[in-house]
Amino acid sequence: MTRKDFFRMMGLLGISSAAVPVSGFAKTGSKNFSSKGKARLVWEKKHLNLEHPWTLSRNTSLFKENVFVHYEKNGITGIGEAAPNVRYDESWESTFKVIEKAKPLMETANPWEYVDLGYSIMAIGHKQNAAKAALDIALMDWIGKSLNIPLYKFWGLDPSKTPLTDFSIGIASPEMIEKKVREAAPYPILKIKVGKPNDEEIIKAVRSVTDKPLRVDANEGWKTKEVALKKILWLEKQGVKVIEQPMPAGMIEEMKWLRKRVHVPLMADESVQTASDIPGLVGAFDAVNIKLMKAGGMQEALRMIWLAKSVGLKVMLGCMIESSVGITAAAQLSPLVDYADLDGNLLISNDPYVGVKVVNGKLILPDGPGLGVKPRKI
Ligand code: MG
């Protein structure tokens, strides 16, 4: 049909271009698309208590101090969260510094140009991506709320396609591992942290309680390819379905050697932070663990998902220890991915927010606009 024919048909049908709604957004009114109006960025630190001491191959934590940002404009407030991580030289103090630097930009930029604004946020200083994630999450929450639609809908995703999330068991004594595994009864898949000398003891403790499928995360704990090979060949016999980050992040050549000798899929976590890391992982890993806090927000995480898929890597959406703000933000993208490890909010005892729910392991997205997150009623 030529352009002329199209307009003739529209005329015959009595449809003028003015009467055609612009997708589902027409109801929100044009005032919401205004870039006028003053914007305000405020932020605060919150102390999040862990249900159990959280031990990985590199450190132990009893609590986390995460940073929450609020972006207000036109009477609408978007919320975002940073979970600073010592592995990436981040703290709440360094996070505050980046947010302070971003304040003039966030308060003067046009939020509807969120792609441009997102790239400008990414360009503020070196790394400190948790701070950048908080800004991007708040921006996207504001966009969704302004359009009055959930973010999964904004990105064209089917909320029924969310994957099952696993539940993580940190390193502990065999007795404590058994207790934690029993507490994790509602979750059909477990992710077990290893990478210290007692790996076999930990897996045996898990297996004494459950025969559920396991994912194992060594958090860079095995320092040579020979050690990693020996550990993985044993773990394959224990019903382990995925091995995450067996060796230190930079050991890509050793990972290629290892991958030829094992059968279980190998997943990159610390070896991948942003999209630019992904092409170099082909041949070394089978899957990538994408986290908003490493990526610097939802927009970069989305770019990473497309890129990983296009080079044949499976995708997990993972998390740090985060409240329901950060976890729900990641869950909004989860209909696109193969695996989810979005349990950070379940590991803290004083989550200040409610958002995504987990029912028998399945992520259930809230249907409110933006992230769909609300403060928890105490
Ligand atoms: Mg990991």
Image (cartoon, grey):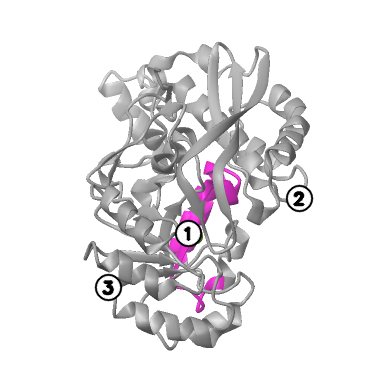
Q: Amino acid at mark 3?
A: Gly
Q: Nearer the viewer, residue 183 or 155?
A: 183
Please name the residue that numbered disc 3 is placed on: 239
User: In terms of depth relative to the viewer, which is nearer, 105 or 128?
Assistant: 128
Identity of the amino acid at label 1? Asn
Where residue 109 sits: x, y (%)?
70, 26
Separation (CA) of disc 3 from disc 2: 41 Å
Please say if the residues under marks 3 and 2 sit with CB atoms less than 8 Å apart.
Answer: no
For disc 2, the neighbor class at 10 Å (few under 14, some 14 to 19, many from 20) is few
Label 1 CB less than 8 angstroms from ligand 1 = yes
- Residue lying at 65% horizontally and 25% vertically, measured from the top left: 43
Mark found first going from the N terminus, 1 or 2: 2
Q: Which residues are magenta?
A: 281-310
Quadrant (top left/top right/bottom left/bottom right) for the C terminus: top left
Of badges 3 and 1, nearer the viewer stands 3
Residue matched to label 1: 289
Q: Specify the principal SS of the magenta part.
A: helix
